[in-house]
Image (tube, rainbow, N blue to C red):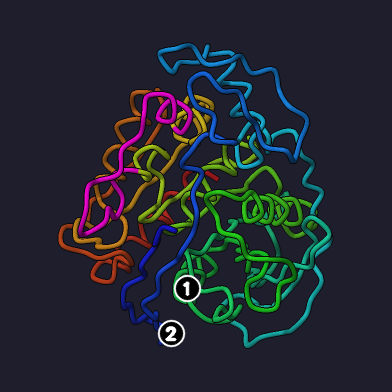
Amino acid sequence: MRRLVQVGLLLLVAGAGWVAVTQPENLPFALPGNLQPGRTAAPSSAPSPEISRPAPDGSLTDAALTALVAWQPISVQALRTRKYPGSALTVRQNLRAGVNYSRQVVSYQSDGLRINALLTVPSGTPPTGGWPAIVFNHGYIPPAEYRTTERYVAYQDAFARAGFVTLKSDYRGHGSSEGEARGGYNDPGYTVDVLNAAASLKADPRVNPARLGLWGHSMGGQLSLRAMLVDDSFKAASLWAGVIASYDVLATDWNPPANGPKPTLDRLNRRYLRALSPNSLLRELNGRPTQLHHGTNDADVPYAFQKALADDLRAAGQGVEAYRYEGDNHNLSQNLSTALRRSVAFFKANL
């Protein structure tokens, strides 16, 4: 059991506060079926792919490794084979309006589940083709404590004031959304909810489906990158303090035990985890820009994750803006207004 995403104290400008939490979650840190040199094994939940027996040195051919990765439900490759029809957005509750936008609790369908979300829509006549829209992906909050109308209030407000539709999905199992909350790293459910949220926005007549972006914080950064790689209709993503290191790095370098040796991986598992990670597919962003924000004093997600991701994006020939906030924490408390202003400008330029 691994402890993930410890959210620090942040008082939002709208008055909502954070509660420090930890997220326990099992990550896919070993080959399925405990595949080891000289042994062929695979999960029993799906037909077996053609996977060659590992060589004595613990290696698999690239083709066999690719087949194994594509067979995992959390992989980008597997997610690309699924359908994301979304549904009409059903109004559940009208909320007090913002300064120049409406606020509603709505729901949509995802895997047959009713998922709740907070929708903001600018007031007035939409531009030709509809409003640009942002799928808003929150970080980890204990699902039983999550409430649709709490947390991230100031964040959504900044984008809504600037003329963007925003939709913050609760994810399955959060608050009163249906389904089981199984985490964002080793289970595809939350990513499926994000992709169905996007499909629901695209079908809304107030939204321009050709002007769709992603915003994600912490765990939501991981979900956003994966969703962007699955659906190439997303034009841009702004990611704050994202948990977006390669899976092999998460397995060994993120929050290692205070007492005892640092976890290690054999060569085969390291290859597998690297290939399973969304970070291995950055070239497939195909020039769609990414913006990164991270504080150097983030005690929950190391600033090194952003630096490595920015370097990898540039090496993959992708556009990236990377902002470093000296001494700031996981929620960019000291630079919230600046980071929001930069994100708004980024979406105005790219959606």
- Residue 157 lies, with reference to residue 324, above or below; the image says below
Instruction: Give the residue at x 76% y 39%.
Output: 82
Q: Is residue 266 magenta?
A: yes
Q: Nearer the viewer, residue 155 or 52?
A: 52
Up/down of 269 relative to 146, above or below: above
Q: Which residue is mark 1?
A: 152
Q: Which residue corresponds to the image point at 72% horizontal and 38% vertical from the top-left? A: 44
Q: To which residue does mark 2 refer?
A: 16
Residue 104 bears which disc, if any? none
Say what amino acid the circle numbered 2 marks. Answer: Ala
> Tag 2 or tag 1, which sits nearer the N-term?
2
Disc 2 element: loop
- In front of the other: 134 or 146: 146
- Whole-angstrom CA distance, mark 1 to mark 2, is 8 Å
Q: Quadrant of residue 179?
A: bottom right
Q: Residues within 10 Å of mark 2 (few under 14, many from 20)?
A: some
Dividing the picture into quadrants, the one containing residue 319 is: top left
Give the farthest residue toward the left: 327
Marks 1 & 2, CB-CB < 8 Å contact? yes
Left or right: 129 with respect to 339? right
**In the image, what residue type sits under mark 1?**
Tyr
Q: Is residue 294 left or right of residue 37?
A: left
Give the image location of residue 196, x and y in percent.
73, 53
Of the 4 image quadrants, the one containing the N terminus is bottom left
| Residue 287 placement (x, y as % from top left) | 49, 28
Query: Percent position (x, y) of residue 76?
Result: 60, 35
Which quarter of the rendered picture does the C terminus lie within? top right
Note whether 224 is above or below 98 in the view shown.
Answer: above
- The span picked out in magenta is 252-273
Q: Is residue 38 left or right of residue 180?
A: left
Residue 66 position, x and y percent, is 58, 21
